[in-house]
């Protein structure tokens, strides 16, 4: 009598309840920090769209463990995904998260800030990204609510409390040096490189995409983006953790990010100079070398037209 509900239907009922609540372990994003150098880790996020399954966490997240505390590079897209990131940090280290660095103004770089602020972390970003965060935070959150439903609950756009001002900045925690490079923006205006000179590891944020096509969005600027890329070439990292895609090398980043941006700019500059209209210029872009990258078919037309408009303004 008491055990009328068999085990399978009981599990089914639990899953149904958790799905109805929009939360719980059945649908939690799987965050895993893999070692990339001593004390340095990366979570490689999904490369497709923001979904319930990835909780909007379709980007890479970094972790640096020092004797004086842990440093997180990007805080995730939502309060809940930030909680999952924190659980993954705890599986690597007992150190508290002292700093969170936001490498740019895209949702998955900073909308988890509220969670980490409540944990006592200091949140750091480049000052040139502040206006972008203020302008787009609400819009990002609206889009995440539409994609994720209740999984976006609890998320409040929370600005950093410490703004890096210069184009080259340095901080140190527990003997580990962190260097920052800002060259006028890239995918977003506040895009900043995080360089660990002792370990020769670079976290590029959205300056580098591999495996999937990069996105030129309305706030992107391809000219300073390439200038930022030149700085990566100067630093010559042994290990490059891109914003999206697998941990990589400079050569792959050159082929999949730099060369595509150069080709876009060269094609669109010629089109603008020759008086070719935007739709003809978009259609004639030689996209073939990049069509093997994920998301290429969806992103290619928008990337091309936005680059044309940028070249028109230059
Ligand atoms: Zn991104």
Image: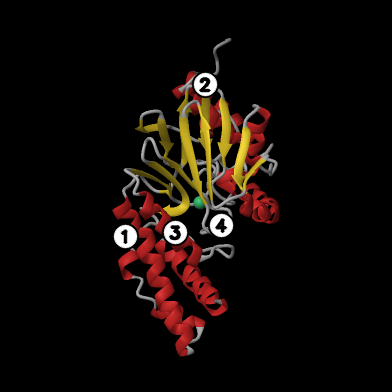
The residue to which callout 1 is attached is 255
Looking at the image, is 19 positioned above or below residue 266?
A: above
Query: Is the distance from the Cβ of mark 3 to the nearest ligand 1 atom less than 8 Å?
Result: no
Report whether residue 246 is seen: yes
Alpha carbon of mark 2 to alpha carbon of mark 1: how far?
Answer: 37 Å
Query: What residue is drawn where x is 64% and y is 41%?
Result: 152
Q: Is mark 3 on a helix, strand or loop?
A: loop
Q: Residue 250 vs residue 189: left or right?
A: left
Give whichever of discs 4 and 1 has the lower sequence position: 4
Looking at the image, is 239 positioned above or below residue 206?
A: above
Query: Is the distance from the Cβ of mark 4 to the nearest ligand 1 atom less than 8 Å?
Result: no
The residue to which callout 2 is attached is 95
The residue to which callout 4 is attached is 188
Give whichever of discs 2 and 3 has the lower sequence position: 2
Q: Badge 3: how crowded within 10 Å, few (<14), some, or many (20+)?
A: many
Looking at the image, the residue that sits furthest to the top is 2
Q: What element carries label 1?
A: helix
Quadrant showing the C terminus? bottom right
Q: Which mark is residue 148?
A: none
Q: In which quarter of the image is residue 262?
A: bottom left
Q: Is mark 2 on a helix, strand or loop?
A: loop
Of the residues tagged 4 and 3, which is closer to the observer?
A: 4
Q: Residue 138 vs residue 253: left or right?
A: right
Alpha carbon of mark 4 to alpha carbon of mark 1: how far?
Answer: 21 Å
Q: Name the foreground residue: 308 vs 178.
A: 178
Q: Name the foreground residue: 23 vs 44.
A: 44
Give whichever of discs 4 and 2 has the lower sequence position: 2
The residue to which callout 3 is attached is 214
Q: Are marks 4 and 3 in contact (CB under 8 Å)?
A: no
Query: What residue is drawn where x is 56% and y is 57%?
Result: 188
Query: What residue is drawn where x is 48% and y is 84%?
Result: 272
């Amino acid at each position: 009598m008491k055990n009328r509900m068999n085990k399978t239907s009981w599990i089914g009922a639990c899953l149904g309840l958790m799905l109805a609540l929009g939360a719980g372990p059945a649908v939690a994003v799987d965050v895993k920090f893999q070692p990339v150098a001593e004390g340095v880790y990366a979570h490689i996020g999904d490369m497709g769209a923001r979904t319930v399954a990835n909780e909007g966490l379709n980007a890479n997240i970094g972790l640096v463990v020092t004797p004086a505390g842990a440093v997180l590079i990007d805080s995730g897209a939502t309060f809940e995904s930030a909680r999952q990131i924190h659980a993954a940090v705890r599986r690597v280290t007992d150190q508290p998260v002292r700093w969170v660095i936001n490498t740019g103004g895209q949702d998955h770089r900073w909308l988890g800030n509220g969670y980490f602020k409540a944990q006592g972390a200091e949140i750091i970003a480049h000052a040139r990204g502040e206006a972008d965060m203020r302008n787009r935070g609400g819009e990002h959150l609206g889009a995440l609510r539409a994609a994720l439903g209740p999984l976006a609950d609890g998320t409040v756009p929370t600005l950093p409390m410490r703004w890096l001002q210069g184009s080259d900045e340095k901080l140190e925690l527990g003997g580990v040096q962190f260097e920052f490079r800002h060259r006028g923006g890239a995918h977003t205006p506040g895009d900043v490189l995080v360089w660990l000179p002792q370990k020769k590891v670079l976290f590029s944020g959205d300056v580098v995409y591999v495996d999937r096509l990069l996105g030129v969005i309305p706030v992107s600027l391809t000219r300073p983006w390439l200038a930022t890329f030149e700085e990566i070439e100067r630093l010559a990292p042994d290990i490059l953790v891109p914003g999206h895609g697998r941990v990589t090398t400079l050569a792959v980043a050159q082929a999949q990010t730099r060369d595509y941006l150069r080709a876009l700019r060269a094609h669109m500059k010629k089109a603008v100079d020759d008086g070719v209209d935007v739709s003809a210029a978009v259609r004639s872009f030689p996209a073939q070398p990049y069509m093997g990258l994920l998301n290429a078919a969806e992103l290619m037309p928008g990337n091309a037209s936005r680059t044309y408009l940028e070249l028109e303004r230059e």
